[in-house]
Image: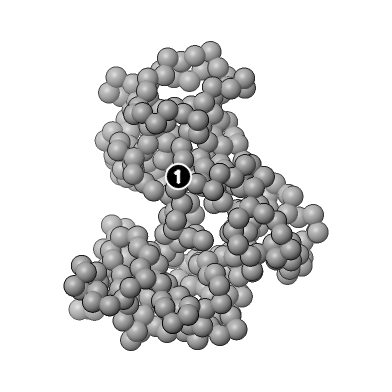
Amino acid sequence: MTGRVTLIVAMLSATAGPIALAAPAYADLKLCNRMSYVIEAALAIEDRGMAATRGWFRLDPGQCRAVLQGTLPPGQLFIHARVPALYGPSPLPQDGRTEFCVGTDNFTIAGARNCRAGQKPANFTAVKPLETEEGLSVTLAEEAGYDDMQARDAGLQRLLAVAGYDPGPIDGVRGEKTEAALRQFTQDNKLSVTAAARSDFFDILLDAAQKPGSGFTWCNDTSYPVMAALGIEDKNAVVTRGWYRVEPGKCLRPEISGQPRRLFSFGEAVDGNGNTIRMGDKPLAWGGTSAMCTRPIKFELYDHHDCLGRGLTVTGFAAIDFTGRVPTTIRFK
C-alpha cells in the first residue's frame, strides 16, 4: 500500500529519450492524474540550451487540468512530480536524468539551470505528449492501470486509510468496506451523504489526514522540520519506513494497514539543509530502546539483523502498544 508504485509518464508515448516538439497547432497541454495519490507537478521546457520551469500544478486522483494554454513552445518537455508529505516516503521514482530548478511554492523560473535563493534542483523526466482531438496530454499513472474513476476511488481509499479509517485494499474498487469507511468519515465530519462527489472532497480528506485523532499521529511542536520513521509489527515481523517530513506546527498521520500489534516511532529534527539539529553534543531526536535498521535516504526495510554489516544505521525506536488501534499521538517537543 505504500512505497511500491511504478510511475508511467506520458501514456502511449514512445519510451525513447527526449524529443523535440515542433509547436504543432494543438490547443492547450493537459496533465492527467491516474494515480491513487494527490500530486503536484512541475513542467520544464528546454530549447537551445535555455530552460524554464513552472509549477506547482495540483491534481487530484482521476483529474485532468490544462497547464499550458495555446501553442506549446518549441523545445523538449520535461515533468517532475511530488506528493504531499502525509503520504510518507514519496512513491514517485525521481529517476529523471535532467536537473532543473524548482521553487517551494507556486513559481515560474526563466533561467532554470542555475538555482538561486529559495530554489533547489529537482530531477525531471523527458516526456512526449499524446496528441488528441482536444490538444496535447501527459498522463501520470500507476502500474495498476487505473482509469479516471478507478484512480479517484483508489485515491479516496488511500486517504481514508491515512485518516485512520479502514477502506479495505487500495484497489480502485468501491466495495462494502470502502462505502462503510466513507459513511463513517462523512458522519464523523458532519458531511452530507453525497460529500464524496464534491470537487473539494480531497481537500477535506487531506485536512483530516493531518489532524490528531483516531489511529496514529505525529505532531511537531518544535520550530524545526522533523524527519520521522515508522515501524509496523505484524505477525512477529517488523517493517520500517522513512522518511516522513513533519513540518513545524503540523501533524501527520502515516498510513497503517492491517492489524499491527505494535508500532515503533523515531523522529529527528533537521535544519533547512537536512542536517541534524543538535542540542549541545546530542541530536534533537525522539526515539527509544528498540533497535531497528534505517538508512539516510528513503527506505522500506524488513530485516533488522546486522544493520551495520549491511551498511545500514542502527536507530533506537520507541515501542507503542497498538492493540485495538487505540488513538495515539506522538508529539515532538
The quadrant holding residue 98 is: top left
Q: Residue furthest front?
A: 235
- Residue toward you, 125 or 49: 125
Element on which disc 1 rests: loop
Figure quadrant of the C terminus: bottom left
Pinpoint residue 31: horizontal percent, then vertical percent. 54, 34
Left of 316 or right of it: where is 29?
Answer: right
299 in relation to 10, above or below: below
Residue toward you, 194 or 152: 152
Residue 313: name its quadrant. bottom left
Residue at 30% across / 60% down in the picture? 297
Please name the residue shown 81% across and 59% down the image. 193
Q: Residue at x 52, y 42 (%)?
A: 141
Q: Position of residue 64 (x, y in %)?
A: 60, 36
Q: Could you classify mark 1 by the number of other residues whose Cα lies within 10 Å: few (under 14), some (14-19), or many (20 or more)?
A: some
Q: Is residue 74 left or right of residue 251?
A: left
**Residue 18 in picture, x, y percent from top left:** 35, 27
In the rendered image, the vertical position of residue 16 relative to residue 64, given as above or below: above
Q: Is residue 24 visible?
A: yes
Residue 56 in sight from this viewpoint: no
* Residue matched to label 1: 7
Q: How is the image coloured?
A: one colour
104 sits to left or right of 284: right
Q: Give the camera-side residue of 16 and 268.
A: 16
The residue drawn where x is 74% and y is 63% is 176
Position of residue 233 in the picture relative to residue 149 (left or right)? left
Where is residue 268 shown, x and y percent of the image? 34, 71
The amino acid type found where label 1 is placed reads Leu
How many callouts does the rendering have?
1
Asked if 90 appears above or below 48 in the picture, the reply is below
Q: Quadrant of residue 43?
A: top left
